[in-house]
Amino acid sequence: MSEFLDLNISGSIASDSLEKKTQSRASNEINATLAPGLIHEVNNILTGIYFNLEGFREVLDASHPLAESVQEIQVGFERIKEVLARITQIYLNAAEREQTYHEVQALVASQIDLLRIVFSKTKTASITLTSPEKALYINVSEYAFRVALLTLATCLRGLYPEGKIEIPMSVLCLEDFSEANFEKYPASGDCVGISFRLPCVALSVAEIDDFYARDNSSDLSMAAAEVLISEAGGRLLFSKGKAPHTSEVAMVFPLYNLNT
């Protein structure tokens, strides 16, 4: 009888342990599925709030009746951003290590709506994306790539004029780099680039940061964007544009070969 009870107790403990492991695994799978989408959606909302607040701060002085309300919203926004940053960091502890291959055009196209928010000095900003006919792949963490791309765009937006603006973007293969004469482009080995065409001549990180130092309208630096791009496995390159008084800046990543 004692042996029978022992077996029942052992079986019950094993069953409880298996159930807990199953629940834990299911919870982890749900979190892995939901976390990126939730973080992405909240970031979308916060991005819109941020740039709208920035627009208000540019037109309201301290004596305006709404200035205090805008400041209160700013404080709330910063608090939400802080909490989200903690949640994001918990997710990134695992997600940043989980690199996989992505088709570049699809990866960039999925960020177009956010890029429109970044560049929305007016409702008439237009972003065009061109790419080679063949699919090109890179091996990156999707989250790290997104942060690097949006940070780069935020640093570049002040270079574009007010009013109706066109922001041409391109997905570039190795042949495009040699034709465009990008400085220090990878001469050996295939690579993929995501480039912005700039309506001015800006051929270094320092030149863009110098522009913002004079304008003093941004708390982000191009140097910070370059670090993020490097951490995502890429490089930042510059080139003179084909049209006068233009240039291009590109995020460059090694081409991922699906056959390897």
Image: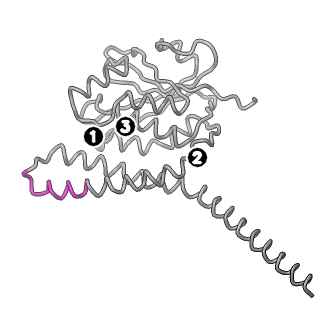
Label 3, on which residue?
126
Alpha carbon of mark 1 to alpha carbon of mark 3: how far? 11 Å
Q: Secondary structure at mark 2?
A: helix
Disc assigned to residue 95: 2
Colour mode?
A: one colour
Q: What's the residue at 50%, 13% (across, down)?
A: 184
Q: Given contact means CB atoms under 8 Å apart, are the residues at marks 1 and 2 in contact?
A: no
- Location of the N terminus by quadrant is bottom right
Residue furthest toward the left?
63
Residue drawn 57% across and 34% down? 104
Mark 1 or mark 3, which has the lower sequence index?
Answer: 1
Q: Which residue is mark 1?
A: 121
Q: Position of residue 28 (x, y in %)?
A: 63, 59
How far across and down, in percent of the image, does residue 205 sit? 37, 22
Mark 1 lies on a secondary structure that is loop
Query: How far, Cα to Cα, is label 1 from label 2?
Result: 33 Å
Q: Magenta stretch?
A: 63-74
Q: Does the magenta stretch mainly form a helix, a strand or a loop? A: helix
* Nearer to us: label 2 or label 3: 2
| Residue displayed at 6% across by 51% down | 63
- Are there few (<14), some (14-19), or many (20+) residues within 10 Å of tag 2? some
> Quick check: 140 left or right of 50?
right
Q: Earlier in the sequence, mark 2 or mark 3?
A: 2
- What residue type is disc 2 on? Ala
Whichever of callouts 1 and 2 sits on the residue coming sooner in the sequence is 2
Q: In whole angstroms, how far apart are the C-alphas of marks 2 and 3?
A: 32 Å
**Residue type, numbered disc 1:** Lys
**Secondary structure category for the residue under label 3:** strand
